[in-house]
Amino acid sequence: MRMKLFFYFLFTFIYYFSFAQQKNVDSLKLNTDSSLSDVVVTAFQSKIKWKDAPVAVALISQQQLQNISTTSLLPAINAVAGVRMEERSPGSYRLSIRGSTLRSPFGVRNIKIYWNDIPLTDGGGNTYLNLIDINNLTGAEIIKGPSASMYGAGTGGVLLLKSSQPFLISPTNSFNASVSSGSFNLLNEQTSFTHQQNNFTTSIQQSHLQSDGYRLQSAMRKDVVKWDGSIRLKDQQLNFLFFYTNLFYQTPGGLTKAQMQQDPQLSRPAAGSIPGAVQQQAAIYNKTLFGGLNHQYKINESFSSETSLMLNHTSFTNPAINVYENRDETNTAIRTKIIYHQKINATDFQWITGAEWLYNYSRIDDYANKNGYADTLQLKDDVYANQWFSFSQIQINYKRWSLNAGVSINTQTMHYKRLTDANTNYVNTNNQNVIAPRIALLYKINQHISLYSLAAKGFSPPSLAEVHPQDRIFHSELQPEYGWNFETALKGDILNHRLQFDFALYDFELKDAIVIRNNSQGAQYFVNAGSISEKGVELWMKFNLLNQPNNFFNALNVWSSYTYQPFYFSSYVQGTNNYAGNAVTGVPKNNFVVGINAETKNNFYLNIQYTQTSTLPVDDANDEFTNAAHLLQLKLGKHFSVHKTFVHFFAGADNLVNEIYSLGNDINAAARRFYNPAAGRNYFVGVSLKL
């Protein structure tokens, strides 16, 4: 009850103050950072200011990406309300938007990811987010909640990554190099060359990251080479993106709570006849070559088109505890849009229609794992996965009103055959003609505050990793999960742009939820199990306390995000157990993040981020919860120039309170091995140069 009253008074205060400040806003001089107020979002092809977009979208700038870490996306993404990124071990990531971790014991599922509007998610529903180097990115947008009307399958949301460079009137060349080192023999090195002119940009980047890891069997190494750029002609623009990543990381495995508390640096030990992670040399080897093109064409004053093509190949090897897997993957994607835009007097009208096709072919060979080497052949599988959808959307802006309405029709098919079984035919799954509408209406209370409401249907078919899980049975019986999301939000800025905020309430009722289970041998598989009620609150605020260039402290910002997710199973029966009313597995009820960014006149800066995460259940029965976690991180540095060379020194620390906690939990794990301990207190220091 106290929580409800708190948000009621907060909502009332912002609403009232938005009117009260209107009378004096024109007489006040803007002297603070108002960058977010002017930033244009691209979610749902809107291309309007953040506070005028009828969508729950979070913007992450290039500076925010590296406010704390220069090696990982975790701190920046975890600062966003409603979003949680986990790391089971260095290089092994999970991404959750509004609780979508439930069906993702590892990897990124149930979320669509694009890079410069080129699909990264494959036809099997998986995204290798760990292939990307944070230094390759110039920003990101996170769309929260079902977005199937324009982005297809996925009830969690969409992540839009960006790395484009602006065109410049005068040709400009720049060279960047950086190196940093830290605890656990961390070494991070990058070099890049960028050329920009009025009709052509290109950037070539190389990076190397390695670490011995905090736990036994948790070393990692990643090498990335990326080339991207843009060519602008009279009525056309071609954007290209190519990268090659060679990624290796060891997988130490989960521990019980007692094992974690006794020694958080342990890897999974042997148990009876089952060997441990060190003996089996458990690890992931991923070599991926990716190529993508994006073509934009202005047909005339009203019509334009945009088409993206993607082709990539992945060689994936995974010596695990019970199996040695080799996987060869080929992925193709096409995404195209026709855009009609017309402005008549006070009415701005946009209509978009298009389609997307994702294709994945996977050859999966499993062997027995004998001390980290492939032994006896167990099976060979062929899997073909296709996803396609067509969509249409209108956007109407009229004075203070904005209407966004769209719908998509979706199909997913998979064809599977076990080559090592004689006289077998292909087994097929077919989820056809799933219709997913969305409608959102926004009203500008004044030039500073906007209020919107939306209704959207989301659906998510099982991914290839769920249809073909660890138990090596092809689960063609799995059905898509789906549901309606209803949401209302208030966002904008007050106090002459000094206080920016985003406050959202949502209710998503998920049906046929896909959840994880373990068989008698401990192998994971998935089932459709009842329904989930996901009602939540998200609040983000940023206050510019100081912006005085002539003072010693010339900039000081305080920001905070709060997430309230009291999700529960509204119906869920497993055998004789009825879990209805239990908290949803793997989702913390409360998550609070607060940060301080300070700058001085002589170009010193300090960034501090504190995160408090409440307990969360690690199994469906709710008979074990994690402890609440408190994480304190900071980064400080200085910018200066020497003979036309810009120099940046920086140093930082992670987990300053030396908390023993699990940053990535194995939910519903066999033998209660739920925990993957994160690193204790650790440090880093580095320098970068720009010529």
Image (cartoon, helix red, strand yellow):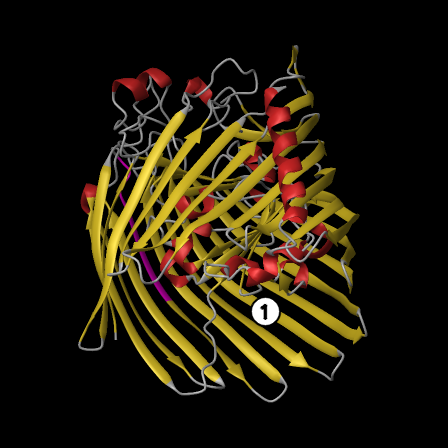
Q: Secondary structure at mark 1?
A: strand
The image quarter containing residue 280 is top left
Which residue sits at x=51%, y=62%?
A: 29
Coordinates of residue 166 in the picture (x, y in percent) = 47, 75
The image quarter containing residue 516 is top right
Q: Nearer the viewer, residue 548 or 28?
A: 28
* Magenta residues, dominant SS class: strand
Q: Nearer the viewer, residue 672 or 689?
A: 689
Q: Nearer the viewer, residue 68 or 224?
A: 68
Total numbered circles: 1
Q: Is residue 415 visible?
A: no
Q: In this picture, is 54 found above or below 216?
A: below
Coordinates of residue 607 in the picture (x, y in percent) = 33, 47
Coordinates of residue 159 in the picture (x, y in percent) = 55, 52
Coordinates of residue 131 in the picture (x, y in percent) = 41, 54
Which residue sits at x=70%, y=34%?
A: 507
Which residue sits at x=31%, y=66%?
A: 206
The image quarter containing residue 293 is bottom right
Quadrant of the snapshot with the N terminus: top right
- Whether residue 222 is in magenta: the answer is yes
Which residue sits at x=63%, y=58%?
A: 43
Q: Which residues are magenta?
A: 217-225
- Whether residue 348 is in magenta: the answer is no
Q: In this picture, is 449 found above or below 602?
A: above
Q: Which residue is mark 1?
A: 309
Q: Amino acid at mark 1?
A: Leu
Q: Nearer the viewer, residue 21 or 659?
A: 21
Quadrant of the snapshot with the C terminus: bottom left
Q: Is residue 449 visible?
A: yes
